[in-house]
Image (cartoon, coloured by chain):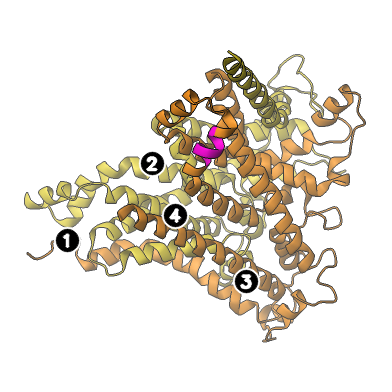
Chain colours: A orange, B yellow
C-alpha cells in the first residue's frame, strides 16, 4: 500500500518557509556571522566599522593572553567568575534548594505548600527588570529591608552590593531560578508510586533514608535534565547586569556582561564576537550532552 | 512509640524549614507590594499610610511611561503573531508531510536555538539588524524574538500535533476537503490548546525581556517598558521610587494574569516545563 501523507511535499515546504526564513536570518546566520566577525577588527565607530580588516586569530590571542588572562576585568577572570557563579547559584543554589523544597513540600500542610510555591514561582515569572529593582531596594544600605531585619536582630548592617557583590548575584540568581528545579523535582517525586514510600514507612525508614534510597535514585534522570538546563541558563543570564552592571570594579562581570561591555561600551566588536564564539562552544557542549542524554533515554524507553 | 514521635518531629521540622525558605523567597518582594501604594515611598519598607493610588495617577499622566507599556505590547503581540503562525505551519508540516529528515531538522533547530543565546550572539544580531537597516525600529525587536523563539515553539507544537490521530484530517479529505482545508478546518481547532500555550509563553518571554531591545533600540519613544523604566531617575541619578514602583506593578500585571490563566487552564506544571 502506498503510504498516504496529508500534505504534499510542496505544501510542506511552503508551510515551513516562514519559520525557516526567520530562524535562518536570526538564529543560524548569527551563529556563522559571529565566527566570521571574531576574525576581524570590526568596531562600532571609525574606519573599522565600515571596512574592517581580517586579523586572523588576534582577538583570540588577546582573550587568552597569559599576561592578562587572570587580571580582573579581562576574559579569563570573567570566565572563572562565571564558572563559580554557575556552580554556586545553579548547581548548589537552585538545584539543591529546589530538591530540598520539593522533598519537604510533600509532607508539609497544604496551605504552607501553596504559599511557598506561590512566592517561589513569583520570583521566577516576574519580569527581570522588576525583580532587579525589588532587589535593589531590598539590599539598599540606608533603608533596605534586609538591613532593617539585620539591625532589628542587633547585628551590624552591610552595604551588600559594595562589600559582597559576587555573593549578592549568587543569592539573587538562586532566588530567581529555584522555582524551576522545585517544580521539576516536585512532579518527578509525585510520579513515584506511593506504595514504595509506604513500604519504607512500615520498615521504619527515616525521611533521609527514603530520600537517599528511593526518591533520589528514581528521579536521577530528572536531576540530569535539570542540571544541564539550569547550568546553560545561568551561564547565559544577563539579569545580574540590572543589579550591579558588572561592578564594582568588574567583580560581578560574568561572561554575558563582559561581552556586552567589550562590544557595546568599548566598541570592540571583533573581540566581543570572539567571546561570543567561546560562549557558544561551551553552550554547544552542554546542548550536545543534553541531546545525547535525551536520545539515550528515548531509546531506553523503546527497548 | 518513639518512631511516631520521630515522624511527628520530622514533620514539624520540615514545616519550619519550609516556612523559613518561603520567607526567604517572599522578603525581597514585600517592599514591592507596599511601595506602589505609598505616595511617599522610598527604598525602605514602610506600610503606606494611607494607601493611595496617586503613584498610579502619576504613571498614567506620564506620556513616556505609557508609551513604554504600549511599545512592549506592540513588540510582544508582533512577535507572538509571527511565532504562533510560523510555528503552527512549520510544525504541522514537520508532523504531516513526507519531508525527509524531519526529526533531524527539529533537533538541529533546537540545538542552534540553545547555542545561539542572546548574550552569546548580541554582536552578530546587532550587526545583522544594522546591515539590513532596521536598527532602532520596533520591527527589528519583533523579528529577532520571532527567530529566537520559533525553534522551541515548533518543538512543543510538533509534540502536540504528533499526538493527534491523523484520521481526523484523513476523514475530512475522504469527504472531499483539500489538504489546506483539512488543516484550517479540522486540524487547527484541535491543536488550538497547544497554540495557546506557545503564544502565552512567547508573549511572556518578549514582554519581560531587556537585553535585545536594549541593544537594538536608541530612541526613547520606541523603548519597551523594560528599558523605559530606566529613565525614571532624577537628574541627580537617584531613582524616582514612587513612579518606579507603581510602573513596575503595572508592567508585571500581564505576566501575572497570563500565569494565572495558564495554571487555571492547564495546571502550572505545564507552564513550568516550557519557560525559557
Q: Nearer the viewer, mark 1 or mark 2?
A: 1
| Alpha carbon separation for disc pair 4 and 2 | 14 Å
Instruction: Please determine whether, in this image, residue B266 is positioned above or below residue A73.
Output: above
**Marking on residue B152:** 4
Q: Which residue is mark 2?
A: B196
Kindly indicate whether the residues beneath marks 2 and 3 are on one polypeptide chain. no
Q: Position of residue B32 (x, y in %)?
A: 70, 29
Chain ID, mark 1: A
| Alpha carbon separation for disc pair 1 and 4 | 25 Å
- Residue A231: say if magenta: no
Q: Is residue B254 left or right of residue B97?
A: right
Q: Which residues are magenta?
A: A210-216
Pointer 2 local density, CA inside 10 Å: few below 14, some 14–19, many at least 20: few
Question: In what element is the residue under mark 2?
Answer: helix
Question: In what element is the residue under mark 4?
Answer: helix
Q: Nearer the viewer, mark 2 or mark 3?
A: 3
Q: Which residue is mark 3?
A: A277
**Marking on residue B118:** none
Residue A12 in view: yes
Residue B134 in view: no
Q: Which residue is mark 1?
A: A5
| Alpha carbon separation for disc pair 4 and 3 | 22 Å
In terms of secondary structure, what is the magenta stretch mainly? Answer: helix
Sequence-first tag of 1 and 3: 1
Chain ID, mark 3: A
Q: Position of residue B220 (x, y in %)?
A: 68, 51
Pointer 1 local density, CA inside 10 Å: few below 14, some 14–19, many at least 20: some
Amino acid at each position: 500500500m502506498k503510504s498516504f501523507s496529508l500534505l504534499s511535499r510542496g505544501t510542506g515546504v511552503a508551510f515551513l518557509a516562514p519559520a525557516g526564513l526567520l530562524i535562518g536570518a536570526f538564529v543560524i546566520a548569527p551563529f556563522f556571522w559571529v565566527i566570521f566577525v571574531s576574525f576581524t577588527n570590526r568596531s562600532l565607530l571609525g574606519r573599522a566599522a565600515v571596512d574592517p580588516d581580517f586579523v586572523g586569530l588576534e582577538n583570540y590571542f588577546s582573550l587568552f593572553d597569559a599576561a592578562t588572562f587572570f587580571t580582573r576585568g579581562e576574559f579569563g577572570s570573567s570566565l572563572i567568575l562565571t564558572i563559580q557563579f554557575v556552580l554556586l547559584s545553579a548547581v548548589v543554589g537552585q538545584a539543591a534548594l529546589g530538591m530540598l523544597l520539593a522533598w519537604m513540600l510533600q509532607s508539609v500542610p497544604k496551605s504552607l505548600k501553596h504559599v511557598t510555591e506561590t512566592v517561589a514561582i513569583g520570583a521566577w515569572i516576574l519580569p527581570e527588570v522588576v525583580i532587579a529593582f525589588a532587589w535593589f531596594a531590598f539590599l539598599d544600605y540606608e533603608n533596605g529591608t534586609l538591613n532593617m531585619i539585620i539591625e532589628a536582630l542587633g547585628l551590624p548592617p552591610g552595604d551588600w552590593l559594595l562589600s559582597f557583590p559576587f555573593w549578592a548575584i549568587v543569592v539573587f540568581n538562586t532566588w530567581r531560578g529555584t522555582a524551576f528545579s522545585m517544580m521539576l523535582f516536585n512532579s518527578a517525586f509525585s510520579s513515584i508510586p506511593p506504595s514504595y514510600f509506604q513500604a519504607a514507612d512500615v520498615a521504619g525508614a527515616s525521611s533521609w533514608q527514603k530520600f537517599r534510597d528511593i526518591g533520589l535514585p528514581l528521579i536521577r534522570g530528572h536531576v540530569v535534565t535539570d542540571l544541564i538546563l539550569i547550568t546553560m541558563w545561568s551561564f547565559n543570564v544577563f539579569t545580574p547586569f540590572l543589579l550591579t552592571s558588572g561592578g564594582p570594579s568588574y567583580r560581578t562581570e560574568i561572561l554575558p556582561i563582559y561581552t556586552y561591555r567589550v562590544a557595546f561600551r568599548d566598541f570592540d566588536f571583533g573581540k566581543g564576537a570572539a567571546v561570543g564564539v567561546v560562549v557558544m562552544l561551551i553552550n554547544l557542549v552542554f546542548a550536545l550532552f543534553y541531546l545525547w542524554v535525551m536520545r539515550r533515554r528515548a531509546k531506553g524507553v523503546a527497548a | 512509640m518513639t518512631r511516631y514521635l520521630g515522624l511527628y518531629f520530622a514533620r514539624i521540622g520540615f514545616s519550619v524549614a519550609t516556612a523559613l525558605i518561603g520567607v526567604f523567597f517572599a522578603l525581597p518582594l514585600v517592599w514591592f507590594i507596599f511601595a506602589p501604594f505609598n505616595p511617599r515611598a522610598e527604598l525602605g519598607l514602610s506600610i503606606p499610610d494611607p494607601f493611595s493610588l496617586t503613584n498610579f495617577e502619576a504613571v498614567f499622566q506620564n506620556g513616556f511611561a505609557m508609551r513604554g507599556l504600549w511599545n512592549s505590547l506592540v513588540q510582544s503581540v508582533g512577535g507572538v503573531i509571527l511565532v504562533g503562525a510560523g510555528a503552527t505551519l512549520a510544525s504541522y508540516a514537520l508532523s504531516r508531510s513526507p519531508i525527509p529528515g524531519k526529526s533531524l531538522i527539529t533537533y538541529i533547530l533546537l540545538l542552534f536555538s540553545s547555542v545561539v543565546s542572546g548574550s552569546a550572539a548580541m554582536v552578530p544580531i546587532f550587526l545583522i539588524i544594522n546591515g539590513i537597516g532596521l536598527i532602532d525600529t520596533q520591527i527589528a525587536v519583533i523579528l529577532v524574538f520571532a527567530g529566537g523563539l520559533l525553534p522551541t515553539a515548533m518543538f512543543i507544537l510538533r509534540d502536540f500535533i504528533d499526538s493527534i490521530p491523523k484520521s481526523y484530517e484523513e476523514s475530512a479529505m475522504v469527504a472531499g476537503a483539500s489538504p489546506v482545508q483539512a488543516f484550517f478546518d479540522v486540524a487547527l481547532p484541535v491543536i488550538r490548546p497547544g497554540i495557546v500555550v506557545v503564544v502565552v509563553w512567547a508573549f511572556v518571554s518578549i514582554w519581560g525581556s531587556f537585553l535585545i531591545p536594549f541593544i537594538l533600540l536608541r530612541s526613547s519613544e520606541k523603548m519597551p517598558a523594560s528599558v523605559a523604566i530606566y529613565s525614571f531617575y532624577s537628574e541627580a541619578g537617584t531613582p524616582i521610587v514612587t513612579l518606579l514602583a507603581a510602573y513596575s506593578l503595572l508592567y508585571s500585571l500581564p505576566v501575572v494574569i497570563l500565569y494565572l490563566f495558564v495554571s487555571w487552564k492547564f495546571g502550572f506544571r505545564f507552564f513550568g516545563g516550557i519557560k525559557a
